Image: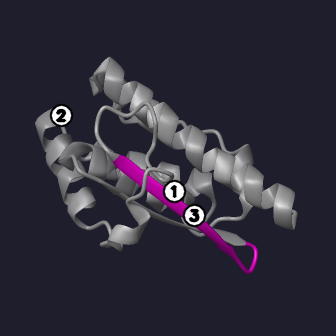
Amino acid sequence: MTINEIQDDIIEEFSVFDDWMDKYAYLIDLGNGLPVVDDSIKTEQNLIKGCQSRVWIDASYKDGIVHFDADSDAIIVKGIVALLMKIYNDKAPQEIMNSDLYFAEKIGLSQHLSPTRSNGLLAMIKQIKLYGMAFNAKYGG
């Protein structure tokens, strides 16, 4: 699936919920479903700067795709991280770099995040795209 197809699926998944308490509960469920990461990725180097909560994102490259490992210490943020992993994990660097994220606006997430959480979301996306750029520069598209 492409990044846009995955975003469209996320928008559809969230459309079944009428209020934000249900959407938050779903986000928490998504976060709880995030694969457990080894504590070795929870380093200062992988810590996303600009997040109110602690978020770690690590990336590796193999066979033309970028694989991410990520975690957070906050339950709602961990759900947001899970959404980003669903969208970006195991994609080509070029696709990551050129992606346009619109799901957060479409599901209403952007309007329901505090300014510090919004900044954190932008910081996570920026770091993911930087990984895409770095792997693209090193290995090609």
Disc 1 and disc 2 in contact, CB within 8 angstroms: no
Check the image and name the residue furthest to the front: 44
Residue 11 at what x, y percent from top left? 41, 45
Is the Cβ of the residue at disc 3 closer than 8 Å to that at disc 2?
Answer: no
Label number found at residue 87: 1
Q: Which residues are magenta?
A: 55-64
| Residue 61 inside the magenta-drawn segment | yes
How far across and how far down the image is residue 50, in percent?
43, 30
Name the residue located 30 percent from the left edge and 32 percent from the top edge.
52
C-alpha span from label 3 to label 1: 14 Å
Residue 59's tag is 3
Residue 33 position (above or below residue 105): below
In this view, the residue in front, 42 or 65, is 42
Q: Crowdedness of circle 1 by 10 Å Cα count: few (<14), some, many (20+)?
A: many
The residue sitting at 74% across, 45% down in the picture is: 98
Please, what secondary structure does the residue beneath circle 3 have? strand
The residue labelled by disc 2 is 20
- Sequence-wise first label, 3 or 2: 2
- Per the model, the C-alpha gap separating discs 3 and 2 is 31 Å
Of circles 3 and 1, the one toward us is 3
* Left or right of residue 84, residue 28 in this image: left
Q: Main secondary structure of the magenta part?
A: strand
Q: Residue at x 75, y 54 (%)?
A: 134
Query: Helix or strand or loop: what does disc 1 sit on?
Result: helix
Give whichever of discs 3 and 1 has the lower sequence position.
Answer: 3
Residue 129 location (% of width, % of height): 65, 46
- Which three-letter amino acid code belongs to the residue tagged 1? Ile
| Other-residue count near label 2 (Cα within 10 Å), few / some / many at <14 / 14–19 / ≥20 | some
**Residue 19's spot in the image, x, y percent?**
15, 34
- Magenta stretch encompasses residue 66: no
- Name the amino acid, label 2: Trp
